[in-house]
Image (cartoon, helix red, strand yellow):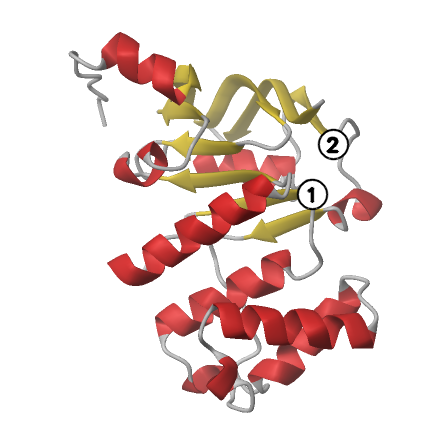
Amino acid sequence: MNALEIEGISKKFGDFHAVEKLSFMIPSGTIYGLLGPNGAGKTTTIRMVMNIIIPDEGSIKVLDRRMDEEMKERVGYLPEDRGLYPKMKVGELLLFLAEIKGLKRSDARKEIDFWLERFDLSDWKSKKVEELSRGMQQKLQFIVTVIHEPELIILDEPFSGLDPVNTKLFKDIMLEMKKKGRTIVFSTHRMEQVEMICDNICLINKAERVLEGNLSQIKKQYGKNTVILDY
């Protein structure tokens, strides 16, 4: 089964074409990279998948269904615009959001302790969110995204603002989640971020698909060539 199927979606804002007849499919249990320069249409595509923005045309199927409120419980979403409650303590925030996502309090506490330990944030559990560095808040936002063990994980620029050590940590965790059968989709404007972990990619430029398919095959086909994007 495909975790995500996008068929011919388009979106305009006034006269601006944000996404133009975009199609791709993402097999379950894979890591998929949406690659392209800033403004290419990656975030608009993700927001259409999450049903935040309605496409002007085309269709989207998430886990073999249309996206609705019930489906969102099976999806983890890290938005480009991060949003946490700065005055709440880390542990309280995670417990609050985990329960909203349907976890029982006892299960939520176990997941919170696991993820705080995994991200080396255990000592910050009683600190207010506003006391955390930007990188720490990024880790916290990731925990919020995956704490309910979603089948499909959608990450909009997940490596933004991370140093090399934490970038590697995020990649390692994403690979671990893939081994557990999760499907991960993430956007980035940097090729090196997709090369180490992606099974398939879609290269978008100026609202349109430029390349799409298996990363290894694309590298073989274009390995001795250069794909030039006209910004």
> Residue 103 falls in which quadrant of the image?
bottom right
SS at mark 1? Answer: loop
How many residues crowd around disc 1 within 10 Å: few (fewer than 14), some, or many (20 or more)? many
Q: Which residue is mark 2?
A: 63
Q: Position of residue 215 (x, y in %)?
A: 38, 21
Are the residues at dot 1 and dot 2 in contact (C-beta closer than 8 Å)?
A: yes
- Quadrant of image for the C terminus: top left
Q: Note whether 227 is above or below 155 in the view shown.
A: above
In the image as oriented, which residue stretches furthest toward the bottom? 126
Q: Earlier in the sequence, mark 1 or mark 2?
A: 2
Kindly identify which numbered label has been placed on residue 151. 1
Kindly identify which numbered label has been placed on residue 220. none
SS at mark 2? Answer: loop
Say left or right for 131 vs 126.
left
> Residue 211 falls in which quadrant of the image?
top left
* Residue type of the residue flagged with mark 2: Leu
- Quadrant of image for the N terminus: top right
* Residue type of the residue flagged with mark 1: Glu
Say left or right for 109 vs 211.
right
How many residues crowd around disc 2 within 10 Å: few (fewer than 14), some, or many (20 or more)? some
